[in-house]
Image (cartoon, grey):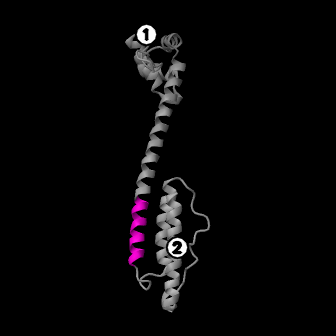
């Protein structure tokens, strides 16, 4: 807006304080506004407000005000969504970092493959959603349910942990792209 320019919902040149205050009451009634409602609230005649409304284009000014309020509301919503996405992305990175640290120290007998994979999967899913991506297609959820780690040989446990590490590294590299 150029300096010195007055927005249409602000007091206009030649508009008295009383006329502007009446417009502000009309404007602030919202989408269901009417001259009759404004006249009732101001204890003024509808005829007088009708004259002021025509003279100072109240309908057009109120519509411009409504559009500006909608624009401001949408901008606030967009900023709030950005802030939430940033917080969620930081949270997901922290969870993934913890999962990787734990994975590097993990004795395969401490956690079942399904527990570990679920931990990583949840962190990856939080990160995906935080950046607006759709949930991962073909997630591994449910695939390892009921696996009895104690029944696996040491060699099978190591092989399963290697498989989980590769899956984690793949997911982390996908998330970094």
Badge 2 or badge 1: first in the primary sequence = 1
Q: On screen, 67 above or below 18?
A: below
- In the rendered image, the residue lying farthest to the top is 14
Q: Nearer the viewer, residue 40 or 156?
A: 156
Q: Is residue 148 visible?
A: no
Q: On screen, 151 above or below 13?
A: below
Residue 176: x and y in percent read 49, 59
Q: Nearer the viewer, mark 2 or mark 1?
A: 2
Mark 2 falls on what kind of element? helix
Q: CA distance from mark 2 to mark 1?
A: 71 Å
> Residue 166 shows which numbered tag?
2
Q: Is residue 47 visible?
A: yes
The secondary structure that dominates the magenta segment is helix
Residue tagged 1 = 13
Identity of the residue drawn at 47% across and 13% down: 45
Identity of the residue drawn at 48% across and 18% down: 8
Residue 69: x and y in percent read 47, 31
Q: Nearer the viewer, residue 168 or 51?
A: 168
Is 9 inside the magenta-drawn segment? no
Identity of the residue drawn at 57% across and 72% down: 140
Mark 1 falls on what kind of element? loop
Is 94 inside the magenta-drawn segment? yes
Q: What is the span of residues highlighted in magenta in the rendered image?
A: 91-105
């Amino acid at each position: 807006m150029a300096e010195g320019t007055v927005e249409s919902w602000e007091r206009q040149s030649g508009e008295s304080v009383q006329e502007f205050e009446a417009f502000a009451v009309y404007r602030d009634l919202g989408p269901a506004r009417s001259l009759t409602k404004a006249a009732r609230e101001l204890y003024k005649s509808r005829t007088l407000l009708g004259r002021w409304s025509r003279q100072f284009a109240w309908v057009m000014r109120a519509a411009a005000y409504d559009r500006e309020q909608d624009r401001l509301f949408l901008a606030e919503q967009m900023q709030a969504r950005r802030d939430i996405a940033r917080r969620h992305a930081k949270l997901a990175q922290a969870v993934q970092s913890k999962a990787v640290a734990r994975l590097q120290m993990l004795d395969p007998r401490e956690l079942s493959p399904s527990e570990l994979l679920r931990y990583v999967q949840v962190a990856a899913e939080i990160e995906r959603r935080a950046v607006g991506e759709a949930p991962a297609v073909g997630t591994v959820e449910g695939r390892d349910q009921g696996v009895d780690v104690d029944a696996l040989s040491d060699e099978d446990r190591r092989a399963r942990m290697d498989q989980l590490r590769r899956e984690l590294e793949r997911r982390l590299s996908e998330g970094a792209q």
